[in-house]
Image: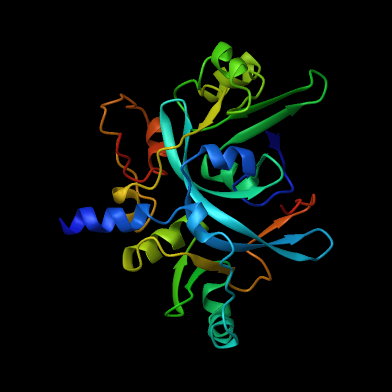
């Protein structure tokens, strides 16, 4: 997946990925391209899981797999691009690691992976890095649609995320049924 | 029972059901949105095309969920008030 700072939306995925996921159609939204052209894309809602945390995001289906600025904004993410080391690290309000490297390398199509951040940066912020994002296929359950806003509830499986960073991401979550 | 039915309706709205159904808002709705411009600039409006009802949210997800409270499973047309498009993309998306 490409991290695209010029993409103001949330997540864009190719049609082949969308066919594998159980996304819920939300409608049509418009995008302004660089040449001023306005194009319309079908928009879906889906839950994106980062490690143990998950949130409801808009997903558009195009020919490309992109992570946009709105996605990172909702995660309160901090992106560090190291041109010397050729790494991109994303730190955010997360407390748990994403899928293991071995797993993500086997399923490269399903995961977005970023290089691990420098240890110094992570320890300074007291946050762990995101190593993977899995777009999950169980979506828009009745609680999510009934919830008018994006007000968080802890997951019902009792996953422990008791510090402030975890609760920041929780605030993104609709109520999720396992 | 009623809750189960509402879930079934919502889950029935799948991507395959909605392909090819693009409807754009009427000039009357767009004029209403234009009148809201100073007050709600930057908010995302989800327009329900049958009733022409408008649901506002800070982003597409919030507007959709507000709309689905009243019209479960319906599709909306999204507009960002005060802007020509909901989002911008400076790279160039390839439309399928």
Residue in front for this viewpoint, A45 or A63: A63
Counting from the top left corner in percent of width and height, residue A80 is at: 69, 29
The correct choice, above or below, for A59 with respect to B78 in the image is above
Rendering coords of residue A58 (x, y %):
53, 50
Quadrant position of residue B81: bottom right
Residue B80 higher or lower than B33, as above or below: above
Q: Quadrant of residue A160?
A: top left
Residue located at (31% from left, 44% from top): A175
User: Residue A164 in the image: x percent, y percent?
Assistant: 38, 32
| One can see residue B47 in this view | yes
Q: Which residue is drawn at 55% across and 85% down?
A: B35
| Residue at the left extreme of this rendering | B1
Tell me if A108 is positioned left or right of A174 in this view. right
**Viewer-proximal residue, A14 or B92?**
A14
Task: In the rendered view, tell whether residue B18 sits above or below residue B82.
Answer: above
Whether residue B44 is visible to the viewer of this picture, yes or no, is no
Q: In this view, does A16 lie to the left or right of A166?
A: right
């Amino acid at each position: 997946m490409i991290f695209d700072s010029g993409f103001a939306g949330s997540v864009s995925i190719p049609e082949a990925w969308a066919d594998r996921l159980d996304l819920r159609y939300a409608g049509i939204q418009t995008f302004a391209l660089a040449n001023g052209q306005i194009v319309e894309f079908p928009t879906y809602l889906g839950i994106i899981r980062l490690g143990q945390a998950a949130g409801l995001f808009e997903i558009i289906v195009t020919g490309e797999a992109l992570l946009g600025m709105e996605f990172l904004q909702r995660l309160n993410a901090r992106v560090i691009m190291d041109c010397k080391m050729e790494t991109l690290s994303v730190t955010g309000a997360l407390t748990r690691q994403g899928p293991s490297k071995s797993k993500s390398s086997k399923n490269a199509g399903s995961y977005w992976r970023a290089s691990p951040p420098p240890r110094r940066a992570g320890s300074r912020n007291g946050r762990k890095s995101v190593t993977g994002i899995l777009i999950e296929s169980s979506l828009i359950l009745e609680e999510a649609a009934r919830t008018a806003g994006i007000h968080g509830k802890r997951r019902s499986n009792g996953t422990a995320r008791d510090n402030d960073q975890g609760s920041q991401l929780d605030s993104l979550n609709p109520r999720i049924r396992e | 029972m009623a809750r189960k039915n509402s879930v079934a309706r919502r889950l029935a709205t799948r991507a395959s059901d909605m392909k090819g159904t693009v409807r754009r808002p009427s000039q009357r709705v767009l004029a209403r949105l234009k009148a809201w411009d100073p007050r709600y600039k930057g908010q995302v409006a989800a327009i329900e095309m049958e009733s022409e009802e408008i649901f506002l949210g800070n982003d597409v997800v919030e507007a959709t969920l507000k709309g689905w409270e009243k019209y479960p499973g319906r599709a909306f047309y999204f507009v960002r008030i005060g802007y020509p498009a909901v989002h911008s993309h400076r790279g160039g998306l390839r439309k399928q």
